[in-house]
Amino acid sequence: MYDEIKYEVDGPSAIITLNRPEALNALTNNMMEELKHALATAEADDAVVGIILTGEGRGFCAGMDMNALDSQASGGDLNDGIALKHLDADPGDKSMGPDFQTAFTYIMSIRKPIIVALNGVCAGLGMSIALLCDMRFASENGRFLTAFSQRGLVAEHGQSWILPRLIGPARALDLLWSSRKVDAVEAKEMGLVDRVFPHDELLDQTKAYIQGLADNSAPVSMMVMKQQIYRHMNMTLGEAMKETHKLMAESLEKDDFAEGVKSFMEKRPPSFAKIEIS
């Protein structure tokens, strides 16, 4: 089905791989459309508990394809020379509101955990996509740079919003202004990535994390928690607390709560409900 990504389901993990290794998986419009379709497919699959996004070869993503950027800088259309598939895809929960329907912010509204497994270079738009995923696991070979200042651009695709929330405003400005390369160790120290693994263990460790979620955590609870985290980043504390009280009262009435307590008392793995996507 796909030309520029790969998609597979392995146990509770859906694995989406950017697949233009000869170009360090630089993004084309076609690849972005395929990515959106694959994310919608994984979100709707009852067998999938979590989604892994990674890259083929020695890099995760070098940003937008330079040929497309050159075409736009010369007055052309960003779509020039790129055959779009126009795949039917509509991932994410629209009830999250318009804040999560602009460009790649739809990633934050997808109802399942998304972990990006950063296997190498992550730059520009590739960095934006990685930052909008829920967690970032990196190979020891990971290298990260924003790249925009070196192209005469600004912090785009949500980086000006998410980056200071992850690492603070001063560090965010440093990375955006200088476009300097950050290795995996420094990225972990500053909070840019959450885990660092030996390169050959990255994908297996990421799948193991999702397997742990599948074994122990209620999918509906994880979905609501993800919505709380991202929605509440845009709310006052009072507003967030009011919504939390409402959601907690609702959760106490659900079968998952009864199952969570019962499985704990019976010392057995829980059997939670799947997410229903209408």
Image (cartoon, rainbow, N blue to C red):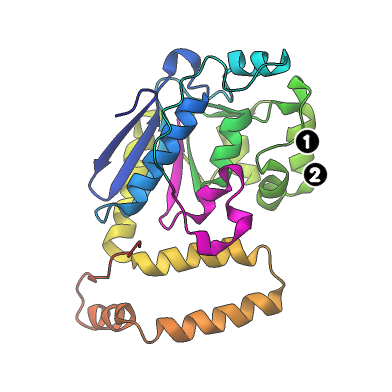
* Quadrant of the rendered image containing residue 131: top right
Magenta-drawn stretch contains 97: yes
Secondary structure of residue under mark 2: helix
216 up-or-down from 112: above or below: below
Q: Residue at x 62, y 82 (%)?
A: 242
* Amino acid type at mark 1: Asp
Q: CA distance from mark 2 to mark 1?
A: 6 Å
Give yes or no for residue 72 being in the magenta stretch. Answer: no
Seen from the viewer's position, the closer of residues 216 and 126 is 126
Q: How many neighbours does mark 2 have within 10 angstroms: few (below 14), some (14-19), or many (20 or more)?
A: few
Q: Quadrant of the N terminus?
A: top left
Q: For residue 174, which numbered disc appears in the image?
A: 1
Task: Give residue 42's position: percent from left, percent from top.
Answer: 34, 47
The label shown at residue 170 is 2
- In the displayed structure, would residue 92 be above or below residue 163? below
Pointers 2 and 1 in contact (CB under 8 A)?
A: yes
Residue placed most toward the observer, 160 or 89: 89
User: Which contiguous range is marked in magenta?
Assistant: 90-119
User: Regarding mark 1 in the picture, which secondary structure is present there?
Assistant: helix
Left or right: residue 45 versus residue 119 is left
Residue 197 visible here: no
Amino acid identity at mark 2: Ala
